[in-house]
Amino acid sequence: MTLIHVPRPPKTAMNPDRPVSSLLRNQIEHLHGAEQRLPVRFRSKIYINAIKTQAEAARYCREVTEAIQHAHAEAAAARAGRVVDLAAAAPEPMVSNPKASKRSRAEKNPASPRVKKKAANSPGDDGKRR
Amino acid sequence: MPQGLDALKHIVVLMMENRSFDHMLGSLQAVDPRIDGITDALSNPDTTGAPVKPQPLAEFQGQLDPDPDHHFPAVDLQIFGGDTSLTRTPNMQGFVKSYFNQRQDVGHSQKIMYYFAQNQLPVLTTLALEFAVFNRWFASIPGPTICNRAFAHYGTSFGRVDMNPVFVNPPFKSIYDRLIDANPKHTSKLYYYDTTSSTMEVANLLQNQPELFGTWTQFLDDTSKGNLPDYSFIEPNYNDHDGDDGEELENDQHPDSNVQAGELFIASVYKAIKQNPSLWQSSALLVVYDEHGGIYDHVPPPACSPNARDGFVASANDTGTGATFAFDRLGVRVPAILISPWIPKATVIGGRIFEHASIPATVTKHFLGDYPLRTAREIAADTFLDVLSLDVMRQDCPDFDV
């Protein structure tokens, strides 16, 4: 079977300081448009008009691409959490029992996923949701 | 049905960047006269009126600076030579004039006619001579990357002829969604090089369906373990950067990246499939370029037949030429090679027109059969799997030392 030699490019071919091509510039614009739809906590702190080199473009592409993936992953995890929660919740009695405890859900079952989730999502001391 | 087509389970498309057919494969006319490449009769006038012939003087990097203009107005000049009359026909005489506009340098403008000698591109030329090369694969639009790539994903660019985001209009779905939503379900993935290179398909697919994407590393793992999806689309590395395993060289072959890096990447994709025998015998790999990058090619792009027009019209403002565009003409010719051990050696596909809508058309036909919710353009596009015509698999396919 014929084995064809493939010459390697020289080391000098690599140039992260090369000016951004029009193709990369457009890709940055598209990613910036997508970035604006992300929640603030996912957005980069990069000013795209200041991107001049391939290395700077590369850094921006990576940050925003990964941020989009993380945002989707977080949403998917939240959906999965709600499904688990629904499956784990005990069926509520159909007829109210006057003798039933007036305790809250948290008091009745502090270990329940819903209780833990609510505690996790409640604003912290800094006012930010976790 | 031929055995090869019957055995086909995986279609893989690798779409490279911005090089014309004559520029990359034109040298092969001297090897196989059936390949419609460079001849001594070809030329383009420069701005002094002197004819400039194509020459095998292309360099791997540093020559096409500035990046040749490949946006709609420039490509219009390249194809029609500056003729703006209503009765004009394509003459492919405007490439040198177009490149002159960017640097005002007569000598430099002539380099747009340079092409690679066969021995400079051992991977691409070997694959073209060993498998099936398309004499008539055109970019879908006489314009730039984003709208051309859209035809490969959706069978249309939804009326865009520029680099603005393409937004999907119902009822037309991407080829990925068609496969995933089918019953029975099929599998599909876009592999970008890594998150630092990312994808050119941001506005719809990355933003809304990032789960469709994998990385080059994952592609290697998937091919090794036999987990390749039914349909895979691979994007090369679009920028020089430091990766997790060291320096990652841009390998998309877009000017002014190093063309040899792209050769290495093409060979790596080929090897990844070939070294898994089960995958090799059940896969077809298409290596194609999104558009010509403003670089010379001699074949006039054909008009689209009336039944192949998808109904979109780009405004005069969007084209930048002062005239509308009814998606009634294809873009400039690009290299396209189909690879499979079920393809007869030295297949040259001539006399048939292909473009990027042929990709979703082919994938849809093979995995889904009849599927009416597509543009007229895609429905009319020719498909290419009939090229897998052998009943006995070849054992003489080459290997590359990558």
Image (spheres, helix red, strand yellow):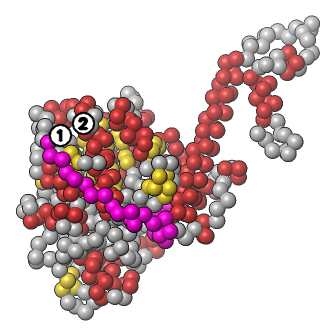
Q: Residues within 10 Å of mark 1 (few under 14, many from 20)?
A: many
Could you say where residue B391 lies in the image, as x and y percent from the top left? 11, 34
Q: Residue furthest bottom?
A: B48
User: What residue is drawn where x is 34% and y is 58%?
Assistant: B261
Residue B273's place in the image compared with B255, above or below, is above
Under mark 2, the amino acid is Trp
On the picture, is B189 further left or further right than A77?
left
Q: Which residues are magenta?
A: A1-29
Secondary structure of the residue carrying numbered label 2? helix
Give the mark nearest the N terminus, 2 or 1.
Answer: 2
Asked if the residue at tag 1 contacts the one at tag 2, i.e. Cβ–Cβ closer than 8 Å, the answer is yes
Label 2 and label 1: CA atoms lie apart by 7 Å
Chain for disc number 1: B
Q: Residue B141: tell me if it is visible.
A: no
How far across and down, in percent of the image, does residue B386 sit? 17, 42
Residue A40: x %, y % from top left: 71, 52
Q: Is residue A18 magenta?
A: yes
As drawn, is B198 to the left or to the right of A99?
left
The answer to whether residue B270 of the structure is visible from this angle is yes
Please report the residue visible at 91 percent of the width from the left and 17 percent of the height from the top: A103
Q: Residues within 10 Å of mark 2 (few under 14, many from 20)?
A: many
Amino acid type assigned to the residue bearing label 1 in the image: Pro
Residue B280, labelled with which disc? 2
Say the numbered circle drawn on residue A55. none
Query: Which chain is mark 2 on?
Result: B
What residue lies at 67% left-to-right and 28% top-to-bottom?
A: A81
Q: Is B70 included in the stretch rendered in magenta?
A: no
Q: Are marks 2 and 1 on the same chain?
A: yes
Q: Which residue is mark 1?
A: B341
Q: Quadrant of residue B161?
A: bottom left
